[in-house]
Image: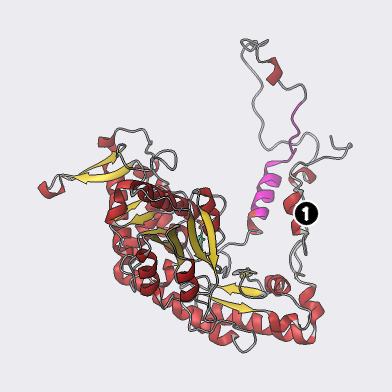
């Protein structure tokens, strides 16, 4: 069923219509002060605003909101992104007036509860990951990577080591090499082996006394746990380099294994993936970074500390001074509201609940994979952890590309999975169902993908012509990105 095209707000309404009218002025009009000085900023023409009645206004925005696709409206199996359902209780907690009415410049004695919350959160994250301390500052996963690399750089400098290279596997998330360059290092890519895991020999060949660190995502972006993890960590440490754990995929291993126990020095988490805080839309987000004891002196400032707990008089303070710290990585202390949601999520589930999250995420991924692997190629065999990567190469033989399959899924009411990533899989379809979906949803999604595979073989034009049910069909994505039209130019008549 095709949805109607949606008019711009400027195409609604009519001349002189208003949603809201101010009463006419009943006090004497006065001249603006220093009018001359600011005259350059005065309008000479009335602004171009839509002229709509209140119901038209409300229907416009409500209509637009109905066109959004989100995890609250449907299945969103975007691989690598963990688009799981965010329990609404988190929102309720984060909206408590005692939390929302705080000001970052309030005296510390008046925000002890808020600081306690953050202190407890970092302690819980340290326990979940097996690290010694955490900073809650970074505002995103990639910002966490950048922060972690600056910590490693500071530590190397303190050791008198000048090292330039940071190694990451070719399956790494694009933010890894980007963070490496931003932190002033040189990114070195190593190939994956035929099992889709780190090629130990290639790693050992790349390691030398110019290596600053290895950045590793585990489970990797193919959804596979690095089976040689201990050997990998030992090899990196043997050349005096650090091991960095990209923990964006923690949803697969919570309560099962911990980066700290695997020997990692630094880890970042994506609370907007694993701990169900808001996701996307440009933030604010949070990407806390955990370190082992030998790196705690370099953590950014301010740091949150507790004193007097042993005497039963715990007091929480923000520390703004530490000689070896890398300094600030953002304004104020942290994305407080986002982190309250993570705190609420962790406390609601507890240790057992978090473990079950991972077990269910892995179960769902493997169930879906088992339903799909006859119809689509699976270049790197499972069992997998929380996600898997199919290849559309069999469908490509019929002239149907993975992009077509993704677009066709929209006609079945599903958000398409991540496509063409990781780069090491031809025509990749990267699917992450998450633990919050029911078997019925997984079955419906599997049926849609099986139908599309049949269509690709028998009626490829249907798949290539998708989507048919959306207000607009295929967009010229390159043009939309390079020449976005963000200004409305009304026709003469209306202006
Ligand atoms: C999402 C993700 C990132 C980046 O996190 P952002 O919060 O989007 O900056 C890094 N690494 C991996 C493996 C990811 O999945």
**Is 9 on the left or on the right of 142, as rendered?**
right
Rendered residue at 46%/49% (across/down): 139
**On the rendered image, what quadrant is the C terminus found in?**
top right
Q: Nearer the viewer, residue 192 or 36?
A: 192
What span is colored magenta in the figure?
46-64
Q: Nearer the viewer, residue 100 or 391?
A: 391
Q: Residue furthest left?
A: 311
Q: Residue furthest front?
A: 209
Whole-percent x and y of residue 410?
A: 68, 70
Whole-percent x and y of residue 234?
A: 35, 69
Whole-percent x and y of residue 235?
A: 38, 69
Q: Quadrant of residue 77?
A: bottom right
Count neighbours of disc 1 (C-alpha within 10 A) and say few if under 14, some if 14 to 19, many if 20 or more: few
Rendered residue at 89%/37% (across/down): 493
The residue identified by callout 1 is: 479
Give yes or no for residue 48 being in the magenta stretch: yes
Q: Is ligand 1 within 8 Å of the beta carbon of the residue shown at mark 1?
A: no
As drawn, 376 above or below 190: below
Give yes or no for residue 346 being in the magenta stretch: no
Q: Quadrant of residue 460?
A: bottom right
As drawn, 68 above or below 112: below
**Is 148 on the left or on the right of 315, as rendered?**
right
Q: Quadrant of residue 239?
A: bottom left
Rendered residue at 46%/73% (across/down): 435
Whole-percent x and y of residue 171?
A: 55, 69
């Amino acid at each position: 069923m095709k949805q109607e095209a949606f008019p711009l707000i400027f195409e609604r309404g009519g001349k002189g219509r208003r949603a809201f009218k101010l009463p006419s002025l009943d006090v004497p009009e006065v001249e603006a002060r220093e009018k001359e000085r600011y005259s350059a900023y005065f309008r000479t023409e009335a602004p171009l605003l839509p002229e709509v009645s209140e119901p038209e206004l409300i229907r416009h925005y409500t209509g637009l909101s109905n066109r959004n696709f989100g995890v609250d409206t449907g299945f969103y199996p975007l691989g690598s992104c963990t688009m799981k359902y965010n329990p609404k209780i988190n929102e309720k907690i984060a909206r408590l007036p005692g939390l929302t009415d705080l000001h970052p410049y309030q005296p510390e004695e008046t925000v002890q509860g808020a600081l306690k919350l953050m202190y407890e959160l970092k302690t819980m994250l340290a326990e979940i990951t097996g690290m010694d301390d955490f900073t809650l500052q970074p505002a995103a996963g990639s910002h966490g990577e950048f922060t972690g690399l600056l910590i490693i750089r500071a530590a190397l400098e303190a050791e008198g080591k000048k090292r330039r290279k940071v190694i990451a596997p070719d399956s790494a998330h694009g933010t890894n090499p980007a963070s490496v360059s931003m932190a002033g290092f040189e990114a070195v890519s190593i190939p994956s082996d035929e099992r889709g895991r780190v090629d130990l020999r290639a790693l050992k060949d790349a390691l030398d006394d110019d290596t600053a660190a290895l950045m590793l995502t585990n489970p990797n972006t193919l959804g596979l746990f690095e089976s040689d993890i201990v050997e990998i960590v030992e090899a990196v440490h043997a050349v005096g380099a650090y091991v960095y754990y990209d923990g964006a995929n923690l949803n697969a291993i919570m309560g099962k294994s911990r980066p700290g126990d695997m020997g990692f020095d630094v880890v970042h988490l994506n609370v907007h993936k694993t701990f169900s805080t808001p996701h996307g839309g440009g933030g604010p987000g949070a990407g806390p970074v955990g370190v082992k004891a030998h790196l705690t002196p370099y953590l950014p400032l301010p740091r949150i500390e507790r004193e007097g707990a042993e005497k039963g008089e715990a007091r929480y303070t923000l520390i703004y001074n530490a000689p070896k710290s890398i300094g600030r990585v953002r304004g104020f202390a942290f994305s407080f509201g986002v982190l309250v949601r993570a705190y609420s999520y962790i406390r609601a589930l507890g240790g057992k609940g978090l473990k079950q999250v991972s077990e269910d995420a892995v179960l769902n991924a493997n169930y879906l994979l088992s339903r799909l692997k006859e119809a689509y190629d699976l270049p790197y065999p499972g069992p997998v952890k929380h996600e898997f990567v199919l290849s559309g190469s069999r469908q490509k033989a019929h002239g149907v590309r993975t992009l077509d399959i993704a677009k066709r899924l929209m006609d079945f009411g599903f958000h398409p999975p991540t496509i063409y990533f990781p780069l090491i899989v031809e025509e990749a379809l990267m699917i992450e169902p998450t633990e919050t979906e029911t078997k019925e949803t997984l079955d419906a999604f599997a049926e849609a993908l099986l139908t599309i595979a049949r269509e690709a073989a028998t009626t490829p034009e249907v798949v290539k012509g998708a989507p048919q049910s959306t207000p607009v069909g295929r967009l010229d994505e390159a043009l939309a990105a390079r020449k976005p039209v963000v200004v409305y130019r009304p026709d003469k008549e209306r202006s």
